[in-house]
Image (cartoon, rainbow, N blue to C red):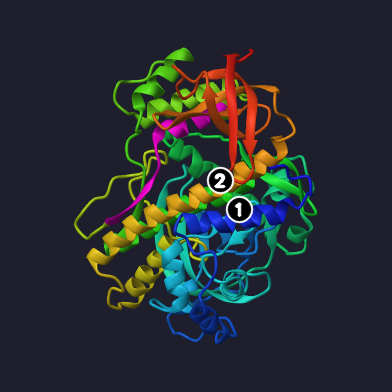
Amino acid sequence: MQTDDKQHRSILQKIAHRAMLQRGLLPDFSSEALAELGRIQSPASINSEQVRDLRGLLWASIDNDDSRDLDQLTVAEALAGDKVKILVAVADVDALVNLGSAIDEHALHNTTSVYTAGRMFPMIPEKLSTDLTSLNFNEDRLAIVVEMVIGTDGSLMDSDIYRASVRNHAKLAYNSVAAWLEGHGSLPEAVAAVSGLEENLRLQDKATQSMKNLRHVHGALSFETVEARPVFDGDEIRDLEVEKRNRAKDIIEDFMIGANGVTARYLSSKKFPSIRRVVRTPKRWERIVELADEHGSRLPDRPDSKALEEFLTKEKAADPVRFPDLSLAVIKLMGAGEYVAELPGETAPGHFGLAVRDYTHSTAPNRRYTDLITQRLLKAAIGGSPLPYSNDGLEALAKHCTEEEDAADKVERQVRKSAAAMLLEHRIGEEFDAIVTGAAEKGTWARLLTVPVEGRVVHGFEGLDVGNRIRVQLTHTDVERGFIDFRKIAPAKH
């Protein structure tokens, strides 16, 4: 299939819709859910005695330039002794999406919003996720607030969770905030427009760096992968834009990791169950050891996150250009994360990659169902209400969310590959350097180093393993099925 008509966006939308159905996901809302949506005309009212009024704080959102479903706001407060109080406000989605409602049933079925190159399929209708339950600029909203007091060394000294009303005073974007914080961009206008926000963001950035340093001391892994998003000119795809880590993304990532840990421990302290996100010990540690040996480093025979972090830190300093390729190989060898229910009195496995034992998903309830479950548990714990879920029900939900999130990931990956196939379909026969990203009975995959595209090595794959560098020739593309095929022709050029 040649896509010379340049209607790339609509083609990708159709591919995504079909892939959703093939994976058992629902691309469209039911008539019952839409009727229910029609009866919701305004944000949740703020009238409970349990709700603190924090609208006057310098709350701001930091997200992608085009994000409209705003789940979190952050703000900081300097305390005596150089301590910093960090507050994370999470949108109270449960206030409008009732357990067992038609909208909730759709969200439960898919368990996540699905972000594809052609279209985003929201977990809950956009009238809610981008408006009435979104923490939008200059709007009063209900939220769950996670409060953390951070010491000078990045350690958590105190924490609390409560309900509050909040107001977003600045809608900020990662790239412009990061450019300013990193010293190669001007102060964003939205920051300058709010008195005191510049100083507050610098305080948040300072706390982030100390939190991050402490996590890495404990063995959190320093990954840096290449993520690419399609760039459209009208309906025609023109390029793949690589997204990189930056200081603004670090603020949100580290605050969310901290908030998720506080949430897990809060529920445990109340003798409540929770759903934890876990990454067990790496699936293929022996291959990670081999990769380290190929780079002149020795890792212990048994999985050790601190030793792995030391290796990754050394390699990032030695070869920052190729470090994302090494990161990708290690991530593939680590294996996928999963959700498990932790019941009172039990201890779930920790998160190997984050070097944290207490970790749940709680900060994105507009787009992830596990976070909505956690929010309902939190509100019951705060208000002294009965548990909204049984233990058996939570265990079933954890398994279901793992399976459906995997299905959603496969849809997103397929559409990304369809978009990449559109870009590459006129480059059949060209040669590229690549790194092997997958090697199993079902096939061998490699990602190009010059174009952030992954495809299958269909010829010459014998003996290849994750992390090998090779030279490949593009032999075939199939936009409809998202197929990109390579033939190995030699080891990669150095």
Please state the horizontal and vertical placement of residue 492, each as a whole percent of the image: 60, 15
Which mark sits nearer the N-terminus, 2 or 1?
A: 1
Residue 333 covered by magenta stretch: yes
Please state the horizontal and vertical placement of residue 412, each as a whole percent of the image: 55, 49
Q: Quadrant of the N terminus?
A: top right
Q: Nearer the viewer, mark 2 or mark 1?
A: 1
Depth order, front residue of 240/439: 439
Contact flag, marks 2 and 1 (Cβ < 8 Å): yes
Q: Is residue 47 left or right of residue 286?
A: right
Number of labelled discs? 2
Q: Quadrant of the C terminus?
A: top right
Displayed quadrant of residue 341: bottom left
Displayed quadrant of residue 449: top right
Displayed quadrant of residue 489: top right
Residue 414's label in the rendered image is: 2
Q: Residues within 10 Å of mark 1 (few under 14, many from 20)?
A: many
362 shown above or below 129: above
Residue 111 covered by magenta stretch: no
Please state the horizontal and vertical placement of residue 478, each as a whole percent of the image: 62, 39
452 shown above or below 169: above
Which kind of residue does numbered mark 1 sit on? Ile
Question: Which residue is rendered at x = 59% and y = 85% of the image?
Answer: 41
Element type at marker 2? Answer: helix
Please state the horizontal and vertical placement of residue 284, each as a whole percent of the image: 36, 28
Which span of residues is magenta-colored?
325-341
The answer to whether one can see residue 79 in this image is no
Q: Residues within 10 Å of mark 2 (few under 14, many from 20)?
A: many
309 shown above or below 32: above
Question: Which residue is rendered at x = 49% and y = 26% of the image?
Answer: 312
Element type at marker 1? Answer: helix
Q: Is residue 423 left or right of residue 337?
A: right
Give the labeled residue for mark 1. 15
